[in-house]
Image (cartoon, rainbow, N blue to C red):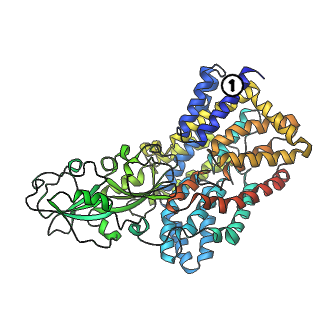
Amino acid sequence: MSFEILFVFSLLAIALFLFSSEYVSFDIAAIIIMCLLLVTGILTPSEGLSGFSNPATLTVAAMFVLSEGLRRTGILNKVGDFFTRQMEDNFWLGFLGMLLFVSLSSSFINNTAVVVIFIPVFIDIASRIDVSPSKLLMPLSFAGIMGGICTLIGTSTNILVSSIAEDRGLEPLAMFEFTPGGILFLSAGFIYLFTIGIKMIPNRRKNEELTSGYKMQGYLTDVVLEPGSDLVGTVLDEQELTAHLDLDVLRIFKPGRDSSAQRSEVYLKAGDILRIRGSAEEINKLLQREDISLKPPKKWVDVDLEQSRDALVEAAVAPDSSLVGETLGEIDFYDRFGAVPLAIRHRGELMHEDLEKVVISGGDSLLLNMSKDRVKQIDTDPSFVLASEVGVYRYRTEKTYKALAILAGVVLSAALGYLPIVVSAIAGVICMILTGCLSADEAYQAVNWKVILLLAGVIPLGTAMDKTGAAALLADGMISLLSVLGPRAILSGFFLLTMGITAVMSNNASAALLAPIAIQTADSLGVNAEPFLFAVTYAASLSFITPFGYQTNTLVYGTGSYKFTDFTKVGLPLNIIFWIIATIAIPMIWPF
């Protein structure tokens, strides 16, 4: 075993650690791996930086923009409204129709974008028909995942594996080559969900106001500024007022007025009411000041925090948010968004105290009190997904047919072989901008640059595995372990291994690591590489057993008030079913 192979194996171990831990974000982990390959000379600069110009990277970036162009027309919301009405008449039939629509949409636009749109829709539906949102949100995520595997462009993983295959002299995977297997998995998944799966999902989240759901009753208080206070006539200095206390001033209410004032740039007067977030213990410390008195306690409801210019908003942290790894104190929500965090649901635990010390994770759900005129800022920030329907977004409905025509052109030109998918997708982006479906700035903002950096960083690792012989060595190990059972058993092993790795790390990273090994294994066996490639590709996306195995699971984790084990309980049987189906069906669709 050469030094180069040993070094690549060491990098694989480092990659698995970095991708499965939160030591650094996954995009930085990928760039670290790429940099080490360049510094050690295992890859030349052109080989190491090839990920940035790889067709997969460019295609995925373009698909983010195309998905955003369609989203901004509001067409998905309109269809969602239609199925909402159907669910009110017949829940199960309407729910089936809506999930099928989610899966269909996820086949042609980014499935994460589809789930983002429908999270607040499903929460609203749950309140109308008196069903726990937990019963709806996990199936929403699963439907998006299963729909994404049905076409080349449904998920970035499919595009990535197609590019890896092409780089190694194989034919690129066609637009609808994924469809037969995808429909088989999708059908089995829906049968499972509607016979067993949905019944197994616990009613974690109740249909109740946000103040009740986040248990804010003991953490909101009104205090009155007494005459003679040295604060009268001054602009509120919250740092001075709440120094060394775990408190936040939400708003200032003026006597005799119905509306609230902002907490900054407001001159205080005697009788002003300060609405404060904090525990009873911290409030008692504040009340040691003689110039502040406590108003009689009340039962808090959402409307108390939605008066005049105020809004109460629930926002989930996107799994690839740039805020992941920062504390709430470092983010400074008030200066950045005009918002004060009231509570956070962090990894299944509801937290009210020492919020500024909480390190943000993807899937965390925040309850925010903020100015209504700043809600749109949160809504359009890719770091967040609004779980509340706030109605602040104006859709470009007049551009609907243009956006649909552009997307159809991209799909058909690639499917019929007129243009490579990377060319048709880039052409579609240009058309979206020229037709006004979205602006150039919106196009830049639509791209998930962390995913792009991830792809650019992990693609060279596959090149290094091929170049050094590490992929061949791993393939030989897989063959020696399972060869007595035949190619089908080896394919089954790849599917199971990929699912397991994807449960703890990025699906794109797991596909980039295992696809080269799968190709090398097929070469060593002297059989068709396609069944092995599809086993890795499907398994890299079909991860249901953890909330972090796929982005959409992470998105609904906090908003559905799920426990980590809820995904294992519902997702493990589904993963086993898919493993069995893959072992039997993939070699039948793509013979060895």
Q: How crowded is mark 1: few (under 14 residues within 10 Å), some or many (20 or more)?
A: some
Is residue 79 or residue 527 the one in the foreground? Answer: 527
In the image, what residue occupies the spot 49% across and 71% down? 206
Give the image location of residue 388, x and y in percent: 43, 63
- The correct choice, above or below, for 466 with respect to 551 in the image is above
SS at mark 1 in the image: helix
Is residue 527 or residue 32 the one in the foreground? Answer: 32
Q: In this view, does 49 lie to the left or right of 124?
A: right
Give the image location of residue 314, x and y in percent: 42, 60
Give the image location of residue 534, x and y in percent: 75, 47
Q: Is residue 496 left or right of residue 440?
A: right
In the image, what residue occupies the spot 71% across and 22% down? 4
Amino acid, disc 1: Phe
Disc 1 target residue: 7
- The correct choice, above or below, for 17 with respect to 114 in the image is above
- The correct choice, above or below, for 292 with respect to 41 in the image is below
- The correct choice, above or below, for 42 with respect to 259 in the image is above
Quadrant holding the N terminus: top right
